């Protein structure tokens, strides 16, 4: 069959630029040549302040405890908190291979904008494209070496920056973090739909601040109500892979930069599912 015949049969004009069937050009950037990363997992939330960075850190710690080589890419450029919770204060250095990540006391490699800025309290007042560029550089220019898992603490929301990050870095699966208030349904669905659009597998939903424990009797109080996240997870056909309480000791360890000393396995099940 001639090429000409093929075109007329399929209605092809021969101009690929306006054709939805034309192969899309991949925007994925190559990782630094001294990095070999097996799995990239994004941690996202539909809005800020729900504990996304905390969950990212705890998943990384669980994976490290399982014996994997683990890194955290802090893509939350305007609210970077990864170095703080791990108590890493030294600045990142560079050599002719690229930027060298810092390593936590527990052996997790981390990269964050706060490891590059002189003043960690200076606000990052940058346009979205510059922020996305910085995140992409954490992928292309950082010497991660060999990693089994790289967790990305994604920028909150579903805007320009997370979109660019998803397009530039080959994220294999995502974990959605939420808190159990009424807004949960809409916010989780936004994050879920973004992953669908980007064709990225949703590995599960983590509900944070699900309950508080009475320090005297150990009773659990579900102060935001029960079952909301579970209902949304069921509707979306996604697993609820962890429920984490408000834990005052954990908050204190984060403030002290000692998150790796926390040993209650809130994320053990979630880490098992990611591993699978
Ligand atoms: P996000 O990344 O979603 O903006 P963070 O992970 O930075 O949120 O959490 C915001 C603050 O709330 C941090 O100080 C963190 O330590 C605290 N926090 C989050 N979840 C919990 C929890 N389950 N128990 C105690 N403190 C928490």
Image: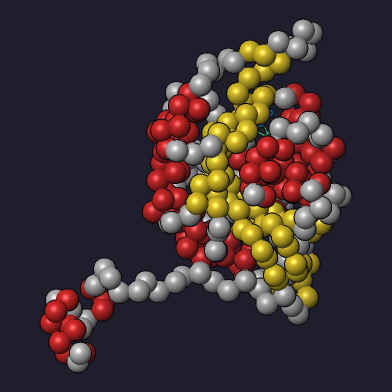
Where residue 118 appears, as percent x and y from the top left, is 73, 57
Residue 157 position, x and y percent, is 47, 44
The image shows residue 208, relative to residue 14, as above or below, that is: above
Q: Nearer the viewer, residue 126 or 162?
A: 162
Quadrant for ligand 1 reads: top right
Farthest-out residue, top: 217
Q: At x 76% / y 80%, what residue is drawn?
A: 96
Compare residues 140 and 272 and report the one nearer the observer: 272
Q: Answer yes or no: is residue 48 visible.
A: no
User: Residue at image x 77%, y 55%?
Assistant: 68
Query: Residue visible at 50% across and 58% down?
Result: 166
Res 178 → quadrant: top right
Image quadrant in which the N terminus is located: bottom left
Seen in the picture, residue 6 relative to 260 is either above or below; the reply is below
Instruction: Give the quarter of the image for residue 115.
Output: bottom right
Left or right of 197: which side holds 4?
left
**Vertical placement of 210 versus 219: above or below?**
below
**Residue 138 visible in rendering:** yes
For image coordinates 68% across by 43% down, the residue present is 272
66 left or right of 168? right
Q: How many marks?
A: 0
Q: Nearer the viewer, residue 99 or 121?
A: 99
Taking the view exactly as shown, the residue that stands out farthest to the front is 1
Q: Nearer the viewer, residue 40 or 79?
A: 40
| Residue 74: percent from left, percent from top | 65, 53
């Amino acid at each position: 069959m001639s090429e000409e015949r093929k075109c007329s049969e399929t209605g092809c004009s021969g101009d690929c630029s306006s054709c939805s069937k034309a192969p899309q050009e991949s925007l994925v950037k190559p990782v630094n040549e001294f990095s070999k990363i097996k799995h990239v997992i994004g941690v996202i939330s539909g809005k800020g302040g729900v504990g996304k960075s905390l969950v990212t850190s705890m998943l990384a710690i669980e994976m490290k405890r399982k014996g994997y080589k683990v890194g955290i890419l802090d893509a939350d450029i305007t609210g970077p908190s990864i170095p703080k919770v791990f108590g890493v204060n030294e600045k990142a250095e560079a050599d002719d291979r690229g930027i060298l990540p810092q390593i936590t006391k527990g052996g997790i490699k981390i990269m964050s904008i706060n490891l590059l800025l002189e003043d960690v309290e200076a606000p990052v007042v940058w346009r979205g494209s510059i922020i996305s560029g910085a995140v992409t550089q954490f992928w292309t220019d950082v010497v991660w070496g060999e990693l089994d898992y790289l967790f990305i603490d994604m920028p909150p929301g579903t805007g320009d920056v997370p979109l660019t990050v998803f397009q530039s870095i080959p994220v294999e699966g995502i974990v959605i973090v939420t808190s159990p208030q009424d807004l949960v349904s809409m916010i989780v669905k936004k994050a879920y739909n973004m992953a669908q659009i980007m064709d990225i597998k949703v590995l599960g939903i983590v509900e944070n601040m699900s309950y508080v424990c009475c320090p005297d009797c150990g009773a659990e109080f579900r102060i935001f109500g029960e079952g909301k996240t579970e209902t949304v997870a069921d509707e979306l056909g996604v697993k609820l892979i962890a429920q984490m309480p408000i834990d005052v000791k954990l908050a204190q360890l984060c403030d002290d930069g000692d998150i790796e000393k926390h040993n209650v396995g809130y994320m053990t099940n979630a880490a098992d599912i990611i591993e699978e």
